[in-house]
Image (cartoon, coloured by chain):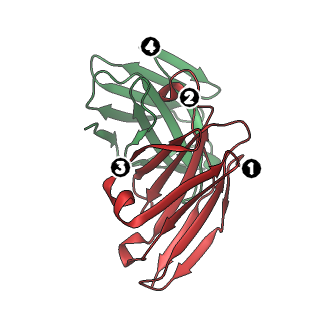
Chain colours: A green, B red
Amino acid sequence: QQKVQQSPESLTVSEGAMASLNCTFSDGTSNNFRWYRQHSAKGLEVLVSIFSDGEKEEGRFTAHLNRANLHVSLHIREPQPSDSAVYLCAVSGYNQGKLIFGQGTKLSIKP
Amino acid sequence: DAAVTQKPRYLIKMKGQEAEMKCIPEKGHTAVFWYQQKQSKELKFLIYFQNQQPLDQIDMVKERFSAVCPSSSLCSLGIRTCEAEDSALYLCSSSQGTGGVGAETLYFGSGTRLTVL
């Protein structure tokens, strides 16, 4: 059974400083990784998807995947107060319909 | 605005009552997923439809829920007898569902917040 763990549980950074979030997963055959953002228990907004080891950039959001270490991270460049939200890591395997989510990291950006 | 539409936004039921919530997937999407989120905690997978057929679901859904997708443009999730533990945000999502569903991006609706008193 896939386990997805995120750290830290909460994070506060100053506006303009880099924010880094971590996610570990248990199933080494997983090949589908996504980062979502959720504002105030509303719907989820997809930020970046990554399927192979290395780096994937979408605007100010960059995901790094290292499947050997069972680790995927999200880095937010020049965060703004409007980026304050819960960030969710989601993982699935090939041809598996469902995503398994981590418990989230609550990110707060100080002006 | 989310391309996946969910109704109602809020639902209040008494313990023992039946509840129903609806989802309109993004046009052209053939895969539909339902997730449950309690008190802003992690999303829990409930059930997955591909071309209106249920392909995967957890035991709780089999036992106490009713979920159908009578058409490609409408799905519903029901709870036969609400319990206090069912209070949660129910999120519907859809994807194109082609070329290996795991590779497709899920797009989420804003959710239905169910409160069971």
Relative horizontal placement of residue B5, taking residue B60 as reference (left or right): right
Q: Chain of mark 2?
A: B
Do tag 1 and tag 4 residues touch (Cβ < 8 Å)? no
Residue at coordinates 47% horizontally, 53% vertically from top-left?
A: B35
Q: Could you say where residue A111 lies in the image, as x and y percent from the top left?
A: 60, 50
Q: Residues within 10 Å of mark 1 (few under 14, many from 20)?
A: few
Q: Could you say where residue B81 lies in the image, as x and y percent from the top left?
A: 42, 77
Specify the label residue B104 is tagged with: 2
Q: Secondary structure at mark 2?
A: loop
Tell me the mark number nearer the camera, choosing from 3 and 2.
2
Specify the label residue B1 is tagged with: 1
Do tag 1 and tag 3 residues touch (Cβ < 8 Å)? no
The amino acid type of the residue labelled 4 equals Gly
Q: CA distance from mark 2 to mark 4?
A: 19 Å
Q: Which residue is mark 3?
A: A9
Report whether residue B39 is seen.
Answer: no
Q: Could you say where residue A57 lies in the image, as x and y percent from the top left?
A: 58, 21
Tell me the mark number nearer the camera, choosing from 1 and 3.
1
Tell me the mark number nearer the camera, choosing from 1 and 4.
1
Tell me the mark number nearer the camera, choosing from 1 and 2.
2
Residue at coordinates 35% horizontally, 51% vertically from top-left?
A: B58
Specify the label residue A54 is tagged with: 4
Residue at coordinates 39% horizontally, 52% vertically from top-left?
A: B42
Report whether residue B115 is seen.
Answer: yes
Q: CA distance from mark 1 to mark 2?
A: 20 Å
Q: CA distance from mark 1 to mark 4?
A: 31 Å
Tell me the mark number nearer the camera, choosing from 2 and 4.
2
- Residue under disc 3 on the same chain as residue under disc 4: yes
First in sequence: mark 1 vs mark 2: 1
Q: Is residue A53 above or below residue B57?
A: above
Residue at coordinates 59% horizontally, 51% vertically from top-left?
A: B69
